[in-house]
Image (cartoon, helix red, strand yellow):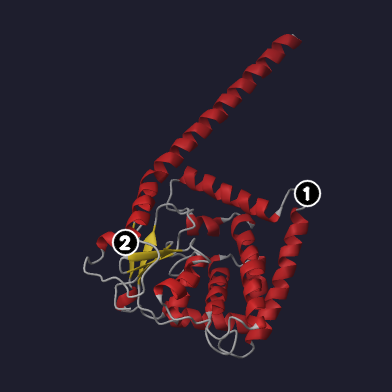
Amino acid sequence: MAELNTLVVRKPCFGLPTGCPQCLSAYIYLKFAQIPFHLDFHLNNPHTDQIPYFEYGDCVVYNNNKEGIVECLKKDVGVVDLDNGVSTLPEWISTKAILTTWLADALAYELWLGGECSSAYSIYYSDLPWPLGKILSWNKAHWVKLKHGITNDNAEVKKGEIYERVNSAYDTLSSCLGEQNYLLENRPSSLDAIFLAHGLVVLQALPESSVLRIKFSEHANLVRYVQQCKTEFIEAAPSPSSVPQFHSGSSSSASRSQSSSKPKNKPKREKTQEEKTFKRKAKYFVVAQLIAVVVFLTLVTTFDDAELELDDGGFDYDE
């Protein structure tokens, strides 16, 4: 892969190259696969599920394609398949289920519903105007509640169920890792990338009082594995091929060399049309959301005025 490859992720924070768990897992997978790439940081449309995305040659693969960006990296881009030979093992399948359900649900719960949700706000919305960021954050928290069926009446019960599953998940993963360097077959796989991204966000982004962080810290070998990854892939000096670059557009292709050649593997998606659509959405995103905020505040004010008039009318009637 001689082309200039670019992984576009959400911005860095909490001492991590990116605070987004999905972006971080793609970053770690590419590191495991020893693929040279640049990092770019997407600052618009923070709610889009297209992030992370990977630009290679004249093409791009998005996170919302097929089964996620890691599968696209393996099948469409030609990145080495780290799961080859292990993805059919029963323990691999069960471990993936644990990582993508129990642990993913628990992290989402802590980020969006735990405490003041300041970590999630820093990762996703801190670059947006304050009212807009708060509204999007509230909307995401509401979505997480709906997904898990959380109401005011069953909130404590649901919380207990989530952390009970987390206990089982961490115990299983700790036993699976043992004293090895990787989760399965003592070799890196996409499961390691997913788990390490989870662990890094838990230990770096969540507050010390976090229940999830406390439970994770009770497993010394899991902490050791995460710290080892942090030392190797994050604290080590970046190579020239992975120096971070910021941009505010939807793609970094505008700043890339026009001489980049197309990969030999014929891509299934052309970049140009996707990029045009994405840029057009990015251009009007902030304006549209700000208009929504103004309309919302106007309606609230109108409603309050109507209530005040009703209250005054009732007072006159009593007199």
Locate the N terminus by quadrant: bottom left
One can see residue 249 in this view:
no
Q: Residue 36 location in percent, x, y?
A: 35, 78
Q: Is mark 1 on a helix, strand or loop?
A: loop
The part of the image, by quadrant, that contains residue 242 is: bottom left
> What's the residue type where badge 2 is placed?
Ser
Which residue lies most toward the left here?
259
> What's the residue type where badge 1 is placed?
Asp
Task: Give above or below for 62 relative to 47.
Answer: below
Q: Residue at x 52, y 55 (%)?
A: 121
Residue tagged by mark 1? 153
Q: Residue 264 location in percent, x, y?
A: 32, 75
Q: In this view, does 17 lie to the left or right of 213?
A: left
Q: What element carries label 2?
A: loop
Q: Which residue is drawn at 45% across and 66% down?
A: 18
Q: In this view, does 135 lie to the left or right of 280?
A: right
Considering depth in this image, is 13 or 254 the residue closer to the camera?
A: 254
Residue tagged by mark 2? 252
The part of the image, by quadrant, that contains residue 232 is: bottom left
Mark drawn on residue 122? none
